[in-house]
Amino acid sequence: MKCYRWIPAIIAAAMLSACGPSLTPDTELTQESDTDQAVETTIIPNMQINDKFYRTLIPYKESASRGLVVSNIYTKYDMKEVETGLMRISQKHFDTDNYYFQEGQYLDETTLKYWLARPNQTEDKGPEYQGLNPSSVDEATGEEMDPTVRATEAPIYLAHIIEQNYLTKTEDNKVKLAGVSIGLALNSVYYYQKEQYGEFFEQKIPEKELEKEGKKIAQEVVNRLRARPELADVPIVVALFKQAERNAIVPGTYTDYNFVDKGKTALEKWEAIDEKYVTFPMSSPEDVYRELNKNFQNFKQDVDKYFSNFTSVFATGFYQNKEIKKLDIEIPIQFYGTAEITGFTQYLTGLMLNHLPLDLYISVSITSVNGPEVLIIKEPNEDEPFVHIYE
């Protein structure tokens, strides 16, 4: 069944469901907890959006450390990317057809708080709870380092740990843990105060230093996971995520990952990840961005001709291995009439097809002070974008 590409808000949800594959009954299984041996009934949805997404077990279980991400990750962009990026990496070893997703259930909030601390802040706990960040105590004097010295010699490298669980279906109608992915969010900049309640200072952490310390921390995390009986024989993916600065308008990215097969502990060959988010338009683009930057500038100029009261038109491009994979465009507007928005949307859709690459995934979000107004999505090599006008 072919969907209409111009879809009014009232029937959008119905049309979306009609465009999907035919529904088949969900699968009901049992799941045994590795921590308390309790047996629960769980459901695997048979509906899968596409092969880029995992099916998620129902009822949905939140991460045992869910609340920490807000306080430990600097920007809303990184909060999303640290999770979705880890899912992309996980698909290299846990495919979406045979594995099901569940938020991490093994690293609880208390454990992570200890792991994210410094060793001298967790001295009263056992070795498995020692802080993974460097000590702030000067070895020569036994005293706390001066804040400025600490910023260069012992910054906080590890900001947060993301855990994801991947499960498979067994022959006896159960689901079991079949893989764990760990994302280590690392600070590219260390923020600190010289005095309590004083102003914040910042110290950039060199990339080579961050990579070295991140890989060292990764090995210790794998050691501690392997020491747990329930995780001793489960494949583990561990990846390093470089956080963006606090004022960044694009997310950071994963830089390296490693895979440890079941029963093994040593991290051997690391795989580099070439991913980057960039903003358009650019004033002085590198060669890899130059053509798309020119196309976007032409698009933006024609958008600006429609009305003069735009605050800005900008886009975020996602690159993998120096190839553009998707472009997300945001357009804030100051007019509110339904006819006006509809006319602008029609004009904008034509500009997309005229100026921007046809083989690219493109999303356009038009917003006003009232919230979302229009969503346009163009799939690669499609010349009929999906358009949704909110009512």
Image: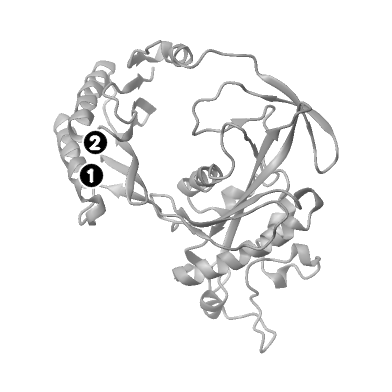
Q: In terms of secondary structure, where does tag 1 sit?
A: helix
Number of numbered markers: 2
Q: Label 2 crowding class (10 Å Cα cut-off): few <14, some 14-19, many 20+?
A: some
Q: Residue at x 38, y 20 (%)?
A: 390
Which quadrant holds the C terminus?
A: top left
Q: Label 1 crowding class (10 Å Cα cut-off): few <14, some 14-19, many 20+?
A: many
- Residue 55 position in % (x across, y down): 59, 30
- Residue 189 position in % (x across, y down): 47, 65
Q: Residue at x 49, y 27 (%)?
A: 50
- Amino acid type, residue under disc 2 in the picture: Pro
Q: In terms of secondary structure, where does tag 2 sit?
A: loop
| Closer to the camera in the image, 64 or 94 | 94
- Residue 306 visible in this rendered orientation of the protein: yes
Q: Are marks 1 and 2 in contact (CB under 8 Å)?
A: yes
Which quadrant holds the N terminus?
A: top left
Residue that sits furthest to the right in the current view: 37
Which label is found at residue 357?
2
Q: Residue at x 34, y 13 (%)?
A: 4
Q: Is 124 on the left or on the right of 262, as rendered?
A: right
**First along the sequence among labels 1 and 2:** 1
Residue 151, compared with residue 339, is above or below; it is below
Residue 26, compared with residue 355, is above or below; it is above
| Closer to the camera in the image, 144 or 174 | 174
- Amino acid type, residue under disc 1 in the picture: Leu
